[in-house]
Image (tube, rainbow, N blue to C red):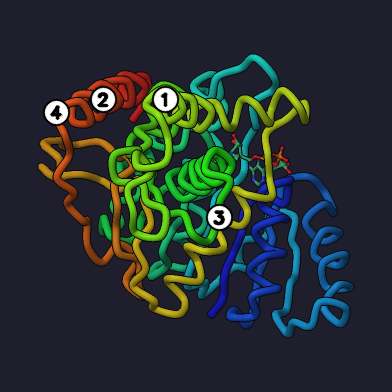
């Protein structure tokens, strides 16, 4: 299994590190536009191999895509990240040009690859990759819901004063503060609905804290987060590499599912060796359906400013 990660910045390097530590890939290639940066990150990570006990070979290149040839999975993290006070949507103009160029270069050398899009605004960047590459829809996947769901579980565990491994929950919808739909109704603690333990007000607080999870970290760090995003991507790559058929909420191109079409937005999917192997239908409440529809409108509005 060969994996390419474009963008050797905070998220790309963290993603490469988690993939290596999990030891399921034979090779990870880091690509960046900054001279020597990907090579440096790769060398630094390789010097952790004997310490962390992995055999994955990590290499870096400054924009030589021939080094990425034959990649099974390619992750796109290249572009700019938001600063405190910025929304993800403000990154659209710059990142669209980068994502379009990068996806074309990747496919030139790895025509059979599966692409995971991370660059923001992620749902719109995922749609852009669909529209400009024409790859089958199962092979283009946006990462947002896996991260948002991890943040949701963190907040739920905090509110419940329970171990995170006892908590389950999922966030669907657009990867934006307003667009996220944390499914509190379906969240559980050891299979028991969390409403058994938490008041409506407390659950609403969990929901709000989840939705601003990225902004909270951007405020604290001065730039956007990287550990949880990197871990979320590595989990998705592992599900594809090891054909686990795990369910992750991912941004997928919809064609009537959830009553939505011609956009990419977060819905639960089964991930396996073919990428998105199934879009899973959940029976949503009327309020959840309404929230998802509003989220889809906002994503479509962003998509309309793409130059396709
Ligand atoms: P960063 O600034 O640390 O890294 C981005 C890297 O991309 C830089 O090293 C830069 O040199 C490189 N780059 C820029 N143009 C390039 C090109 N044409 N080819 C190759 N490399 C290029 O940013 P960070 O924090 O790693 O974030 C990356 C992206 O991921 C941002 O758009 C951010 O908003 C997004 N993000 C998305 C998340 C999600 O859940 N979908 C979560 C966290 C970040």
Q: Mark 4 points at which residue?
A: 286
Answer few, some or many: residues within 10 Å of disc 4's Cα (few below 14, many 20 plus, some between 14 and 19): few
Q: Position of residue 77 (x, y in %)?
A: 59, 46
Residue closer to the observer: 93 or 275: 275
In this rendering, position of residue 247 left or right of residue 1: left
Which label's residue is closer to the chain start, 3 or 4? 3
Q: Name the residue under label 3.
A: 164
Is the CB of the residue bearing disc 4 within 8 angstroms of ligand 1? no
Q: Name the residue under label 1.
A: 204
Question: Badges 4 and 2: C-beta atoms under 8 Å apart?
Answer: no
The Cα atoms of the two marked residues, 3 and 2, are separated by 26 Å
Question: Badges 3 and 4: C-beta atoms under 8 Å apart?
Answer: no
Secondary structure category for the residue under label 2 = helix
Is the CB of the residue bearing disc 3 within 8 angstroms of ligand 1? no
Which residue does the image show at 21% across and 56% down from the upper left? 280
| Mark identifier at residue 291 | 2
The Cα atoms of the two marked residues, 4 and 2, are separated by 9 Å
């Amino acid at each position: 299994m060969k994996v390419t990660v474009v963008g050797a910045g905070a998220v790309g390097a963290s993603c490469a590190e988690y993939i290596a530590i999990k030891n399921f890939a034979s090779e990870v290639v880091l690509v960046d536009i900054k001279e020597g940066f990907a090579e440096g990150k790769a060398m630094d990570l390789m010097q952790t191999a004997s310490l962390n006990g992995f055999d994955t070979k990590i290499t870096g290149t400054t924009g030589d895509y021939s080094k990425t040839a034959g990649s099974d999975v390619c992750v796109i993290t290249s572009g700019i990240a938001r600063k405190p006070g910025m929304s993800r949507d403000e990154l659209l103009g710059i990142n669209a040009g980068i994502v379009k160029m990068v996806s074309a270069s990747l496919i030139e050398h790895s025509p059979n690859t599966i692409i995971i899009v991370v660059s923001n605004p992620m749902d719109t960047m995922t749609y852009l990759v669909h529209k400009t590459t024409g790859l089958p829809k199962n092979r283009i996947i946006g990462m947002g819901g896996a991260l948002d769901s991890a943040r949701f579980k963190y907040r739920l565990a905090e509110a419940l004063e329970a171990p995170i491994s006892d908590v389950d929950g999922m966030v669907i919808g657009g990867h934006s503060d307003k667009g996220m739909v944390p499914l509190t109704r379906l969240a559980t603690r050891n299979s028991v609905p969390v409403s058994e333990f938490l008041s409506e007000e407390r659950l609403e607080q969990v929901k709000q804290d989840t939705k601003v999870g990225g902004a909270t970290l951007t405020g604290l760090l001065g730039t956007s987060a990287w550990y949880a995003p990197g871990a979320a991507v590595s989990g998705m790559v592992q599900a594809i590499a090891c054909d686990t058929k795990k369910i992750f909420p991912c941004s997928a191109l919809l064609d009537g599912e959830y009553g939505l079409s011609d956009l990419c937005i977060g819905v639960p999917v089964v991930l396996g060796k073919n990428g998105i192997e199934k879009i899973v239908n959940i029976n949503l409440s009327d309020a959840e359906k309404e929230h998802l529809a509003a989220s889809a409108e906002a994503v479509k509005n962003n998509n309309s400013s793409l130059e396709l």
